[in-house]
């Protein structure tokens, strides 16, 4: 019997499709990419302009590749089944390179793809096996080379001009640019005052039928609050004049317009639409949305059905749906909702002009699998997202909603100022709910023309005169454009053609991980550029105006699509790009501003000596420093202060809103947990030890590991300001809240004891770089006395040492002489050495045997006492963390 090897990307996906295949199939996972460019070199041939990438087996993947090679040797056929996109095709190509080293081996390798992980889709995929699509591979490879060229050739410039550790990204920099430009637009915005006016009215014959109408114009000229120009009210004086005129006006109904409006069903989700709706309706960020969707796609245990893929592939820009799926949705609608909700023919949706249209829209694999029927098998976040996808898809095949819209135009003729004030009230009534029975489309902003009033609009047919009850006026100010949140940023990127469905999540993750932007204001928080983000963005846009232009970035995306379709050679695109890039790179090397060495004279004066202040750049951004400071003169002025003007304004209500501090696994969407490793705290997926495992981990930056300063209730002995507990590079410490003016740091001193070496300094607790505690003299570096064990101010009864040390062993806590030498006796309770043995152990040295047990050893650390402690991690995990 022949044996076939099937290779997929993830263990979860392998587990799902394994049950659809017979005994002759073995399913293995590559666990993502197995090959990439080297990290210590650019890895792209540039001298001859061939741009050939130097691909190597990714570090840490050698064992996986060896296992796949051994399995491939035993197989008669090899099917490569990574995801159906460019990245998946590249993984398949790399697998083929590793497994097909001979002509015989190459013949047995085939590529299969499926848009959904169902029995039918998997079986159809094997029936349509093909060769690896080189055009798709070239498109992915071109993107990878473009990103490598930008990252590896621009980042060193940033290290030299700004700060080490910074990096540039071809698409990510453009995304940061959008956020920076929006922030500057907000900062430059000047609010303008305007007033709105509403009238509470009722028919002259029915006082109980009260309603509100809003002012929309004067003498037929429409009011615009965008420009706040006439006839809009720009001051309280103007609104009061209008109020006085309207008090004696004659109110009549000018016209009543009634019409029916049809609202067609929305198309099923594309990636960006899913990300936007999940953000607005569920409060999910992009990372969480894609992680949960990935799990639903790869498969969930559904009772007797076993592991089943619940949705189609979640990276797509097409609203297209297969005829079988349409038929399934229509069958459910007709059976459960009735014929009136089922249109005569299926609804068909067209994609955007520049859409790749490589995959179907995001939909459930079976419309009959309702959220209610599988709710008990799903986590809360999985159920919410599946419900959103299921309802949107089924609603897309339902009849339009029918609405009755009534618009009443009212004229208020004033004899006082000879003006006619135009008021309007509109109401919408649902005649037939149609698709809205299942799904209501979310809106970013309210459309005033379609606004339904809170009070029900009375029947005004035949009514002519109206009576005024009261006038309601309110002051407003024009507002700047809103900062981007994740949903609006994805929408902006999509509309501008920057990035593609598979890249939106990584773009947003990267600009936050690099700390170029921060998000404030809850789960639907807005993006604020950091100072370093603004500086890097400005330098890159100044020095590389062509490469980081938004239109050029979008053009490159279109050219990548052309490569995928075989319309353009990948080397031609790279040659055209590199012509511009090389010129700008040479120019930037000579002309880019040197922020690191900046010393800009300002009009600010020193608070201490009155000298002009210099604007300089330091480890934590820009700051002011006194120009009178001299390194060689210890008595010169050392005054510094923060440059708050360069920081984003965090005093806005949206910035002060409590944030969503939870991190979500990008692979499965679950809330990640905090764990402690040898290299500090890091985030890990709770499914790390499951079968199949989810081994997603995320390193925390030093800034993320830090806690905000906590008041201790004590005052600083140096300046009187409150002391606070801070998080430093080597652990927690107490210092003055008035830093940097006051640099007092509270030290954990041993009371009543001076340094035994110099006799002048005190002994204080210290923490080493690796986290271990020791005690040292406060006169360091003049005195280098240290002790790994806590000194105790007691004289040794045997050798008259000036102090003893407190040592903790497994067998207990002991008070010992510092002259006691280490030996095998420490593994158990200490034993005394004979005088002869002591002399032999250290000829010429003072050797003491004093040791006294004073208590039990403390219990081992727990999560309650020391925070989350990770079980012994794998070597690979430690390297990544």
Image (tube, rainbow, N blue to C red):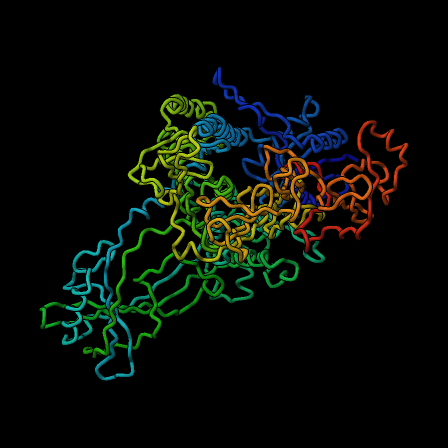
Query: Where residue 461 sits in the image (x, y, percent)?
Result: 25, 77
Judge left or right: residue 520 versus residue 841. left
Count all numbered tags in the image, as a single digit. Answer: 0
- The part of the image, by quadrant, that contains residue 216 is bottom left
- The part of the image, by quadrant, that contains residue 54 is top right
Judge left or right: residue 316 versus residue 462. right
Query: Where residue 415 sits in the image (x, y, percent)?
Result: 9, 73
Residue sitting at 74 percent across and 39 percent down?
25
From this viewpoint, is residue 642 visible? yes
Judge left or right: residue 341 versus residue 463. right
Query: Where residue 636 sits in the image (x, y, percent)?
Result: 40, 34
Q: Nearer the viewer, residue 32 or 719?
A: 719
Say above or below: 869 vs 85.
Answer: below
Q: Nearer the viewer, residue 333 or 639?
A: 639
Say above or below: 547 vs 658.
Answer: above
Picture quarter with the N terminus: top right
Residue sitting at 33 percent across and 51 percent down?
481
Q: Nearer the viewer, residue 211 or 547?
A: 547
From this viewpoint, is residue 326 visible? no
Picture quarter with the C terminus: top right
Query: Where residue 448 sits in the image (x, y, percent)?
Result: 31, 62
Say above or below: 226 vs 474.
Answer: above
Q: Nearer the viewer, residue 821 or 204?
A: 821
């Amino acid at each position: 019997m022949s044996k076939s090897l099937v290779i997929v990307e993830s263990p979860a996906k392998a587990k799902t499709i394994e049950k659809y295949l017979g005994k002759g199939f073995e399913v293995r996972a590559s666990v993502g990419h197995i090959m990439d460019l080297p990290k210590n070199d650019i890895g792209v041939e540039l001298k001859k302009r061939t741009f050939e990438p130097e691909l190597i087996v990714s570090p840490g993947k050698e064992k996986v590749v060896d296992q796949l090679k051994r399995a491939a040797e035993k197989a008669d056929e090899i099917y490569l089944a990574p995801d159906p996109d460019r990245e998946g095709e590249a993984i398949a190509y790399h697998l083929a390179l590793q497994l097909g080293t001979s002509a015989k081996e190459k013949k047995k390798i085939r590529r299969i793809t499926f848009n959904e992980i169902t029995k039918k889709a998997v079986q159809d995929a094997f029936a349509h096996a093909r060769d690896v699509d080189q055009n798709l591979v070239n498109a992915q490879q071109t993107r990878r080379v473009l990103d490598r060229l930008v990252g590896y050739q621009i980042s060193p410039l940033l290290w030299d001009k700004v700060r080490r550790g910074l990096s540039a990204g071809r698409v990510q920099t453009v995304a940061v640019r959008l956020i920076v430009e929006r922030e500057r637009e907000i900062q430059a915005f000047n609010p303008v005052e305007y007033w709105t006016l509403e009238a509470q009215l009722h028919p002259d014959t029915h006082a109980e039928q009260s309603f509100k109408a809003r002012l929309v114009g004067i003498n037929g000229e429409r009011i615009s609050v965008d420009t706040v120009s006439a006839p809009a009210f720009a001051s309280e004086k103007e609104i009061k004049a209008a109020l006085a005129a309207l008090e004696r006006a004659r109110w009549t109904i000018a016209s009543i317009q009634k019409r029916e409006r049809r609202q067609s069903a929305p198309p099923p989700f594309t990636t960006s639409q899913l990300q936007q709706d999940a953000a607005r309706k569920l409060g999910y960020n992009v990372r969480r949305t894609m992680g949960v969707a990935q799990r639903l796609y790869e498969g969930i245990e559904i009772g007797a059905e076993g592991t089943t893929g619940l949705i189609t592939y979640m990276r797509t820009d097409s609203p297209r749906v297969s005829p079988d799926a349409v038929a399934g949705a229509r069958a459910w609608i007709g059976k459960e909702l009735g014929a009136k909700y089922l249109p005569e023919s299926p609804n068909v949706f067209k994609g955007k002009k520049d859409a790749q249209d490589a995959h179907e829209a995001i939909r459930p694999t079976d419309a009959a699998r309702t959220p209610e029927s599988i709710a008990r098998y799903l986590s809360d976040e999985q159920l919410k997202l599946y419900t959103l996808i299921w309802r949107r898809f089924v609603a897309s095949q339902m009849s339009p909603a029918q609405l009755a819209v009534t618009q009443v135009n009212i004229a208020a003729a004033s004899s006082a100022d000879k003006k006619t004030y135009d008021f309007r009230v509109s109401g919408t009534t649902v005649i037939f709910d149609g698709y809205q029975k299942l799904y209501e489309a979310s809106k970013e902003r309210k459309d005033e023309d379609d606004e339904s009033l809170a009070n029900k609009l009375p029947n005004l047919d035949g009514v002519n005169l109206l009576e005024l009850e009261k006038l309601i006026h309110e002051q407003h100010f024009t507002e700047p454009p809103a900062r981007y949140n994740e949903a609006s940023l994805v929408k902006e990127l999509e509309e501008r053609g920057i990035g593609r469905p598979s890249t939106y999540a990584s773009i947003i993750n990267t600009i936050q991980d690099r700390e170029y932007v921060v998000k404030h204001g809850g789960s639907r928080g807005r993006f604020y550029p950091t100072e370093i983000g603004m500086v890097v963005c400005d330098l890159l846009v100044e020095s590389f105006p062509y490469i980081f232009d938004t239109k050029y970035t979008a053009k490159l995306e279109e050219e990548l699509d052309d490569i995928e379709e075989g319309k353009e050679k990948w080397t031609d695109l790279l040659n055209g790009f590199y012509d511009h890039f090389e010129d700008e790179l040479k120019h930037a090397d000579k002309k880019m501003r040197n922020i690191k060495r900046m010393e800009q004279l300002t009009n600010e004066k020193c608070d201490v000596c009155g000298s002009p202040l210099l604007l300089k750049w330091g480890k934590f951004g820009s700051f002011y420093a006194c120009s009178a400071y001299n390194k060689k003169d210890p008595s010169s002025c050392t005054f510094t202060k923060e440059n708050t003007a360069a920081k984003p304004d965090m005093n806005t209500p949206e910035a002060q809103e409590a944030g969503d501090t939870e991190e979500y696994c990008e692979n499965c969407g679950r809330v990640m947990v905090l764990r402690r490793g040898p290299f500090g705290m890091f985030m890990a997926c709770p499914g790390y030890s499951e079968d199949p495992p989810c081994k997603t981990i995320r390193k925390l930056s030093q800034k993320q590991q830090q806690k905000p300063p906590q008041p201790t209730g004590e005052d600083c002995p140096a300046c009187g300001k409150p002391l606070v507990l801070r998080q430093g590079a080597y652990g927690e410490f107490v210092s003055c809240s008035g830093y940097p003016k006051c640099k007092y740091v509270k030290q954990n001193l041993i009371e009543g004891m001076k340094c035994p070496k110099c006799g002048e300094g005190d002994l204080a607790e210290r923490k080493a770089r690796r986290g271990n505690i020791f005690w040292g003299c406060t006169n360091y570096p003049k005195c280098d006395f240290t002790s790994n064990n806590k000194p105790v101010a007691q004289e040794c009864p045997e050798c008259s040492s000036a102090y003893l040390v407190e040592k903790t062993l497994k067998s207990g806590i002991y008070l010992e002489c510092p002259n006691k030498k280490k030996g095998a006796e420490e593994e158990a309770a200490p034993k005394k050495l004979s005088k002869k043995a002591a002399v032999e152990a250290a000829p010429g040295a003072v050797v003491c045997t004093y040791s006294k047990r004073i208590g039990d050893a403390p219990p081992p650390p727990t999560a309650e006492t020391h925070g989350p402690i990770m079980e012994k991690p794998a070597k690979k995990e430690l390297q990544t963390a």
